[in-house]
Structure formats: C-alpha cells, structure tokens
Image: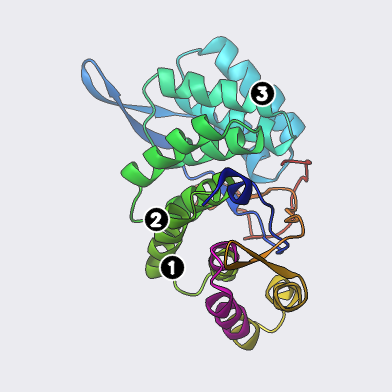
Amino acid sequence: MSEAVNKRSVSLVLLRPAILLLSIGIACIASAGGVEQQVCDVGADYYLGVEDYPEAIRLHTEVVRKHPDNVLAHYHLGFAQGMMGNRTAEVREYQRAESLGLRNWDLFLNMGLAQLENGDLNAATEKLQRAVLLGGNHSESHFNLALVYERRGLLADAEREMLASLKLDPGQPDARNLMGVIYAEEGKSQRASLVWRELVHDVPEYEPARENLGLLGNQVEVVRGETVAVTPLRRPPSKRFDTNANRICQHPKYGGDRHNSSRE
C-alpha cells in the first residue's frame, strides 16, 4: 500500500482505550542484590485513589523529594501528572521509575500511551511492544499495541494484535469497534460491517458502532481497487482508570470519563 494510502485518515468513531495503573502499594523490582520490595506512601496514594490529582501530585512530589529512589512514587506521580494532562512530566516520571528498575508491564503500557498521545509513535511502539512482551496475557497490552500500529498504518500488525486482545477478552466493545476500524482501513468493508452490526446487536447502547455503520455505508471511495473510508478519524480524549484492587480507595468508574485533555 502506497504512502499516500497509508497516511489517509478513516472516518470512523474510535474510543481511545483507558490507561491502566496496575502497579500498586507493593511491587517487586530487579536490583543488583536480587529482588527488593518497595512501598509507596499510603496518604499520597489515597488522593490518587479518590481522583484528587493536584493533591496526589503535591504529596507524591514530596515523597520523591524525601525518597528519590522510591520507584512506585515516581510511577504514581507520573500517572497523576498524566491525568492532569501534563504529558512531559508524566513521561519523565515513568522514565525515572524505569531507570530505577521498575519492570511492570503496565508501566510500559502507560508510558507508551503517553508517548503516543504526545505524537512520538516510534517510542510509543517500542514501549507498547515491551508491555506485550511482559504482559501478553492481558488484553489491554495487545489492544494498545494494535492502536499504535493502526495509527502508523501498519494494519496487518494492528489486526494481529487486536485479534489477540479479543481472544483474551472477546466481549470488550472498544476492541470490537477498533477491529472494525482496522478492517475498514484494510478495505475489508464487509468484515467491518459485520463486526459493527454484531456489536450493535450485542451492545445496543454502544453508539460508535452505530455511527461507524453509517459512515461506512455513506463515505467510501475506491483507492487502487480497495474500498476505503476517507473522512478524518475522530478520536476522543484519553480515558484513564485505575484497576488497583489493593489500593485503599478503588476507582468504580471502569471506563468512565475522567480528566479530559486534548490528546491526539
């Protein structure tokens, strides 16, 4: 497929995946002396848990000032910065956590998505590939790697990772929607239509699938023998959530709206 076709934008509604914070109060990190356990500050994490991100940033900043080698504090500080839309600070804290030895798959997932949203597709690809390598049994890792592949126009790779994500969790509407997006971009309009029709049947309240069906039917053209959609893809801001089962305050809004920042 030509570069011009690779760069085309597709007129399909795509929900950006949530970014996970799975690294919690205690984590194992590699060190020269073996495996070391670290804990983050309970009070600082409380404000992260109740979504008071300015206070979480203030308290975690104080923690890393007093304990600059606390990898979890750097990680959690980065997450809070990201929730406030401070992408440069977010990535910086993730990189500090990595340099101190943190090797959790979700660290690389979060870092990769922050880099993707910052437009650094090469760095994002590398980090999300590491997330899959370390957390290949998590559907989210494959989903987000598929997302960056789709953004780069590497559609065969995107299809492979999305199928892997759906194999692990067949019911996720966002993944099924993105699968339809990928099929449409590949010119497989019948497959895309089938995916969205099934999604509308199974989850009637999921509006992106219904909208995509209309877009697929009304806005297509032939490019080198392939039927492709041609209106720019609309991407909403990132939605983040915390699935930390061990945190003192859990996040109930799984997939719900949080702080929105214009991330393209």
Marks 3 and 1 sit apart, C-alpha to C-alpha, by 32 Å
Marks 2 and 3 sit apart, C-alpha to C-alpha, by 27 Å
Please provide percent x and percent y for residue 193: 60, 80
The residue located at (77%, 59%) in the rendering is 231
The magenta segment: 181-198
Q: Which of the two labelled residues, at mark 3 and mark 1, occupies the earlier sequence position?
A: 3
Position of the C terminus by quadrant: top right
Side of 125 where 50 appears, left or right: right
Q: Which is more foreground, mark 2 or mark 1?
A: 1
Label 3, secondary structure: give it.
helix
Marks 2 and 1 sit apart, C-alpha to C-alpha, by 10 Å
Considering every residue shown, the one lying at the far bottom of the view is 201
Few, some or many C-alpha atoms within 10 Å of disc 2 (few <14, some 14-19, many ≥20)?
some
**Amino acid under disc 1:** Leu
Q: Which residue is mark 3?
A: 88
The residue located at (52%, 37%) in the rendering is 112
| C-beta proximity under 8 Å, tags 3 and 1 | no
**Amino acid under disc 2:** His
Q: Is residue 252 magenta?
A: no
Please provide percent x and percent y for residue 150: 55, 52
Q: From this viewpoint, is residue 187 visible?
A: yes
Q: Which residue is mark 1?
A: 166
